[in-house]
């Protein structure tokens, strides 16, 4: 905040709030200055804040957030309060403006203040992500024998999710994806009532959550006999992924990392069918920085301690798709691969 010349800042985005304070609840905001750390929340979380955030002063929201924010602003004694522009809604912004009316305090929209601090994971964070990855691998291995033609995508997803919870996950890091046949050509399809069929691609994108941190794994399978087309597309995607996994290391730019896999797919003639980035950061959120993207305006070097996915894919409408995704930790010498599911 000092480097950015921010006198005070309201942290409201859920993962940023947890990262800064340790709070695991769903409602609350932090107001930070050089000398004060205030936590605004309602009755449901008073005791939780006292347990999880001992370094913060609890400011009880007994009426509306507008009233509590007005009190917090007075305690902060700041002339300007930075707010997270990508999180604050128009309605909340208006409430805060109303609360400050006549107080000669301005609101300053900012972005990417806390997020850069989350890019590099410490040992405890990596341990939580690794444990989530282990549970994810094990749940998939335990669930796959139950998959059969005639079960729905939703039923297949539940077979995985219930095993994650039985194995110690707090829950899932995101809505699990089981997408079969033409549905697998949708990179972020949702499980549906469609029945699994033999000889079709089935994309399984899953992640358990441990201590607030999530894993992210994708495998593409086929029930019964594989078609020649499935083997061809799968082989190209696997070659692309292995090329990236073998070469990415700290110091390489995010854009160069993406190109390692993208060039393999383009050379095979399927470049336009790989329309998303090669990977993204994973932590408290399943999608966070950095991005391994061909669209980066300013390529940035990967740094040791970043946890990212490596997930090339090919998507063919009306037939289906293939995606293979591993979760990795960037190191000086290469990648530490956290995913162990067969591929």
Image (tube, grey):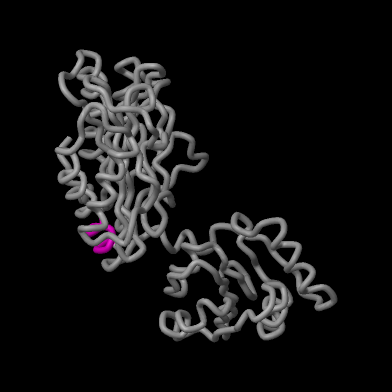
Seen in the picture, residue 86 relative to 154 is either above or below; the reply is: below
Residue at image x 50%, y 63%?
14
Q: Quadrant of residue 42?
A: bottom right
Residue at image x 72%, y 67%?
107
Position of residue 181 in the picture relative to residue 57 (left or right): left
Depth check, front residue: 75 or 8 = 75
Q: Check residue 127 for magenta coloring.
A: yes
Q: Quadrant of residue 310?
A: top left
x and y percent of residue 124 in the render?
Answer: 28, 68
Query: Which range is magenta?
Result: 126-132
Farthest residue, direction front: 150
Position of residue 102 in the picture relative to residue 263 (left or right): right
x and y percent of residue 216 in the render?
Answer: 31, 47
Quarter of the image that includes the N terminus: bottom right
Q: Check residue 151 for magenta coloring.
A: no
* Figure disc tally: 0
Q: Quadrant of residue 100?
A: bottom right
Seen in the picture, residue 287 relative to 240 is either above or below; the reply is: below
């Amino acid at each position: 905040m000092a480097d950015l010349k921010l006198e005070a800042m309201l942290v409201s985005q859920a993962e940023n709030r947890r990262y800064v304070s340790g709070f695991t609840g769903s409602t609350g905001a932090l107001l930070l200055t050089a000398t004060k750390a205030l936590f605004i929340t309602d009755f449901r979380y008073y005791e939780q804040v006292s347990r999880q955030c001992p370094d913060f002063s609890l400011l009880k929201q007994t009426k509306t957030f507008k009233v509590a924010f007005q009190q917090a602003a007075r305690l902060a004694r700041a002339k300007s309060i930075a707010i997270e522009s990508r999180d604050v809604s128009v309605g909340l912004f208006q409430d805060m403006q109303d609360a400050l009316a006549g107080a000669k305090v301005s609101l300053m929209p900012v972005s990417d203040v806390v997020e850069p601090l989350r890019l590099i994971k410490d040992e405890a964070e990596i341990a939580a992500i690794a444990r989530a990855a282990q549970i994810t691998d094990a749940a998939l291995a335990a669930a796959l024998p139950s998959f059969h033609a005639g079960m729905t995508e939703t039923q297949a997803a539940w077979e995985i999710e219930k095993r994650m919870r039985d194995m110690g996950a707090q829950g899932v890091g995101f809505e699990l994806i089981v997408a079969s046949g033409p549905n697998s050509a949708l990179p972020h399809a949702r499980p549906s009532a469609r029945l699994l069929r033999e000889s079709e691609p089935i994309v399984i994108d899953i992640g358990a959550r441990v201590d607030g941190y999530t894993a992210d794994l994708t495998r593409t399978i086929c029930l019964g006999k594989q078609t020649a087309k499935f083997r061809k597309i799968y082989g190209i995607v696997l070659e692309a992924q292995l090329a990236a996994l073998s070469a990415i290391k700290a110091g390489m730019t995010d854009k160069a990392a993406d190109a390692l896999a993208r060039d393999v797919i383009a050379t095979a003639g399927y470049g336009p069918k790989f329309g998303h980035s090669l990977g993204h950061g994973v932590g408290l959120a399943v999608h966070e920085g950095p991005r391994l993207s061909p669209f980066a305006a300013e390529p940035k070097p990967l740094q040791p301690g970043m946890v990212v996915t490596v997930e090339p894919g090919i998507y063919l409408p009306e037939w289906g798709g293939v995606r293979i995704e591993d979760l990795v930790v960037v190191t000086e010498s290469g990648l530490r691969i956290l995913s162990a599911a067969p591929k």
